[in-house]
Image (tube, rainbow, N blue to C red):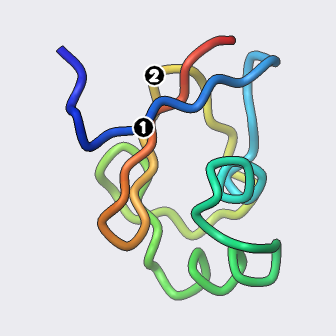
Amino acid sequence: MSNPETEEIPIRDDMIRLGQLLKLASLVEDGVEAAELIKNGLVKVNGEIDERRGRQLHPGDTVTVNGQTVKITAA
């Protein structure tokens, strides 16, 4: 029942921080770009805008940036 437009991103640990995920999923090129998008309210976590770069994400969480959605999964 996964959305075909949602890419799954496996993580090794039980959590990843939002800024790290954006880089891992290639949604941004670097931490500076991640910080700008987050600060400007352009990143949604589980459907809601989140402005915390250090936000902890866990398997099952979704992140949307510029119309692209990724879902965190356990490796």
Say which amino acid is labelled 2. Answer: Gly
Q: Mark 1 points at which residue?
A: 7
Q: Give residue 38's mark.
A: none
Nearest the eye: 38 or 74: 74
Residue 74 drawn at (x, y percent) = 63, 12
SS category of the residue bearing label 1: strand
Residue at 57 percent across and 70 percent down: it is 51
Q: Residues within 10 Å of mark 2 (few under 14, many from 20)?
A: few
Residue at point 55%, 19% (across, down): 73
Give residue 71's position: percent from left, percent from top. Answer: 45, 33
- Asked if residue 25 is positioned above or below residue 26 in the image, the reply reads above
Residue 6 on image: x %, y %: 33, 39
* CB-based contact (under 8 Å), mark 1 and mark 2: no
SS at circle 2: loop
Rendered residue at 37%/50% (across/down)? 69
The picture quadrant where one finds residue 16 is top right
Marks 1 and 2, how far apart at CA: 12 Å
- Mark 1 or mark 2: name the one nearer the start of the chain: 1
In the image, is 73 to the left or to the right of 36?
Answer: left
Q: Is residue 1 above or below residue 38?
A: above
Q: Name the residue under label 2.
A: 60
Can you give x and y, in whole percent of width and height, for residue 23 in the image? 73, 58
Q: Relative to residue 41, is residue 19 drawn left or right?
A: right
The C terminus lies in quadrant: top right
